[in-house]
């Protein structure tokens, strides 16, 4: 405030002095002499103190006839030359400075153009590769774009109550990783976002047999240090996809403890022991490792194909789940309700377990039927076996030769908007149905009678495992008085019942027909009595014949019930196990009873 007041006073003082000077000059003319034209200070301290009017004057001097001296002219000439040189130097310096500034601006512009050109070339390259870009308006022109490499239908994160307490934290962590800002580096290249610079991870599946690793899924590794940004984004996307598979399976494993699934030390253990190996423990070991650790090595193992198939199958199942989520979102929404609709988890481990359990049950049953057919053929009983491990797989394999992707449909329930590949993968998410038909000879003619065994496997309601439905032919029901359909929950129960059915069929129907009218069936056991043909030298005798099928082997025991004290040779038996050189059952009994 004080400085402003001082400035005001100095300005007023200078203005008053200028007015007084002009008025004093004009006072030389009597007509313009007025005391009021002076300032109050000058009137009080000047005019009243005796300063007369017109005491300061101005005049013009005529220098036309003035002749300068030689020294003065030379001095003025030198001064003019110096002024001209100084002016030229100033102009040249100004021009040099302007030129330098223009060059600096041109170089800066060239660098910026080069940076912008390289940045936009990489942006266009990323866009041409199909990666979706979006503008980052909140960051302004410094960060115009970001690439979304996360799968649009992925990362619907579910959190098990025993693992996470805050669903939003887990969900946001995955969502944030699916978007990477494309920042410009000093040279114009795209600077890697921290999410893109992370070491990519991959899913590893190993096969363990009795604690020894016999198979590992392997994945190639990119070794190029100057990897293109598009490849880096692809590796980040693949890593995020692999992490989602492992995350979904780790949550799913806690619901499958009853099916031999364990989660220990960040590793998922799945029991896939085979029925043919009685003393072999076989497991799937699934974990998530850095991609560099899963590089393909020189050592190959016997079960590498199985580990690789399981890993690729899990990836296909999750990709199919993403497509089906998009399909469901594109349909008309269901009616609104107050209750929150739960998103069903993708059936990854569940499908793998279902496949192995189904193959385990079906292969064990088919192995038994092959043994039975071979045994009965060697015993002279004509049988036929038809096997299908899974009906939809068999139909699909038969139709792939003339496959039309445009017209392919799995039935009236399939939607036209679902792609053919997704319709194919839907087959693996349905219950598996295996079929086996054991055709037995009929006693009434050449037509065969079929014993049908349907094997259904599903990890979910209403079965929760493998179920075997056995259907008997009507003729067999009428002769043996059995139920037409029976359900069994294990292969051992099914084969045990089939052994009993086949034993009854051979005794009550096959042998009774071959030795009629000498054969008599008594009771519901697999036994019959056959009377021998008597001669003049040898009287007739009765033989008690017992038929026993066990584990696919046929045993026939004949006992002479008239032999006192069961003498030597009274009890004779024979076992058929599939040797084609053995005599038939009828030949064996004919040689015995005549």
Image (cartoon, rainbow, N blue to C red):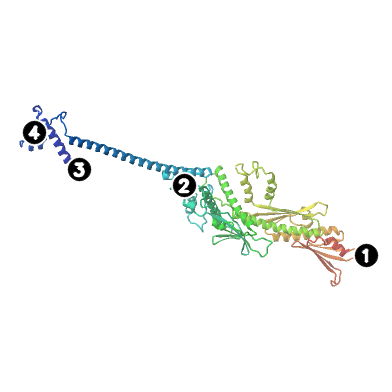
Number of the label disc, if any, that sits on residue 535? 1
Quarter of the picture containing the N terminus is: top left
Q: Secondary structure at mark 4?
A: loop
Nearer-N-terminus badge (2/3): 3
Number of the label disc, if any, that sits on residue 4? 3
Give above or below for 461 relative to 110. Answer: below
Closer to us: 315 or 43? 43
Instruction: Work out how far the residue at label 2 is from the one at label 1, CA to CA, in angstroms.
Output: 109 Å
Instruction: Work out how far the residue at label 2 is from the one at label 3, CA to CA, in angstroms.
Output: 56 Å
Closer to us: 76 or 28? 76
To which residue does mark 2 refer?
Answer: 189
Nearer-N-terminus badge (2/1): 2
The reply to whether residue 155 is visible in this rendering is no
To which residue does mark 4 refer?
Answer: 55
Is disc 4 in contact with disc 3, using a CB cutoff of under 8 Å?
no
Residue 212, percent from left and from top: 62, 64
Q: Residues within 10 Å of mark 2 (few under 14, many from 20)?
A: many
Q: Residues within 10 Å of mark 1 (few under 14, many from 20)?
A: few
Camera-near label (2 vs 3) is 2
Instruction: Work out how far the residue at label 3 is from the one at label 1, CA to CA, in angstroms.
Output: 157 Å
Q: Residues within 10 Å of mark 4 (few under 14, many from 20)?
A: few
- Residue at 69%, 50% (x, y): give it: 394
Q: Secondary structure at mark 1?
A: loop
Camera-near label (2 vs 1) is 2
Instruction: Work out how far the residue at label 1 is from the one at label 4, CA to CA, in angstroms.
Output: 188 Å
Q: Secondary structure at mark 3?
A: helix
The reply to whether residue 544 is visible in this rendering is yes
Residue 322, percent from left and from top: 56, 48
Q: Secondary structure at mark 2?
A: loop
């Amino acid at each position: 405030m004080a400085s402003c007041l001082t400035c005001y006073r100095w300005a007023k003082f200078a203005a008053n002095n200028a007015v007084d000077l002009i008025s004093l000059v004009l006072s030389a003319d009597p007509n313009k002499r007025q005391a009021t034209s002076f300032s109050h200070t000058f009137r009080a301290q000047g005019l009243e103190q005796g300063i007369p009017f017109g005491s300061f004057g101005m005049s013009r001097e005529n220098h036309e006839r003035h002749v300068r001296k030689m020294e003065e002219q030379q001095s003025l000439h030198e001064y003019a030359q110096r002024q001209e040189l100084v002016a030229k130097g100033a102009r040249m310096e100004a021009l040099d400075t302007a030129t330098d500034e223009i060059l600096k601006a041109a170089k800066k512009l060239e660098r910026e153009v080069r940076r912008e050109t390289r940045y936009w070339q990489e942006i266009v390259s990323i866009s041409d590769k199909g990666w979706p870009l979006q503008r980052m308006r909140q960051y302004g022109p410094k960060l115009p774009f970001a690439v979304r490499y996360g799968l649009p239908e992925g990362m619907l994160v579910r959190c098990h109550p025993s693992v996470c307490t805050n669903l939003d934290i887990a969900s946001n962590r995955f969502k944030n990783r699916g978007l990477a800002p494309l920042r410009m580096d000093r040279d114009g290249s795209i600077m890697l976002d921290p999410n893109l610079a992370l070491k990519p991870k991959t899913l590893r599946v190993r096969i363990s047999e009795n604690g020894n690793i016999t198979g590992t899924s392997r994945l190639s590794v990119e070794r190029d240090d100057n990897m293109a940004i598009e490849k880096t984004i692809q590796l980040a996307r693949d890593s995020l996809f692999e992490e989602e598979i492992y995350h979904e399976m780790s949550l799913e494993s806690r619901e499958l403890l009853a099916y031999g699934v364990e989660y220990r030390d960040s590793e998922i253990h799945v029991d896939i022991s085979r029925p043919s190996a009685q003393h072999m423990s076989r497991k799937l070991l699934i974990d998530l490792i850095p991609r560099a650790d899963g590089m393909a090595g020189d050592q190959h193992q016997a079960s590498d194909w199985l580990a690789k198939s399981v890993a690729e199958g899990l990836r296909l199942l999750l990709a199919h789940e993403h497509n089906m989520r998009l399909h469901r979102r594109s349909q008309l929404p269901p009616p609104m309700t107050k209750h929150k609709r739960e998103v069903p988890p993708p059936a990854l481990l569940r499908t793998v377990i279902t496949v192995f359990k189904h193959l385990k049950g079906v292969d064990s049953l088919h192995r038994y039927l092959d043994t039975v057919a071979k045994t009965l053929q060697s015993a002279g009983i004509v049988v036929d076996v038809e096997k299908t491990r899974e009906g939809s797989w068999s139909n699909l394999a038969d139709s792939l030769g003339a496959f039309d992707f445009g017209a392919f449909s799995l039935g009236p329930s399939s939607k036209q908007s679902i792609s053919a590949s997704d319709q194919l993968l839907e087959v693996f998410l349905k219950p598996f149905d295996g079929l086996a038909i054991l055709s037995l000879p009929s006693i009434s003619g050449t037509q065969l009678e079929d014993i049908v065994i349907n094997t259904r496997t599903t990890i979910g309601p209403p079965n929760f495992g493998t179920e075997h439905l056995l259907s008997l032919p009507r003729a067999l029901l009428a002769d043996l008085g059995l139920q037409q359909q029976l359900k069994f929950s294990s292969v051992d129960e099914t084969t045990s019942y089939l052994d009993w059915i086949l034993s009854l069929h051979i005794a009550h129907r096959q042998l009774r027909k071959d030795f009629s009218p000498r054969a008599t069936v008594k009771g519901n056991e697999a036994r019959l009595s056959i009377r021998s043909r008597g001669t003049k030298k040898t009287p007739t005798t009765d033989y008690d014949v017992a038929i026993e099928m066990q584990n696919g082997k046929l045993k026939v025991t004949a006992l002479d019930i008239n032999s006192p004290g069961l003498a030597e040779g009274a009890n004779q038996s024979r076992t058929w196990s599939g040797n084609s050189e053995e005599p038939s059952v009828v030949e064996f009994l004919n040689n015995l009873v005549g």
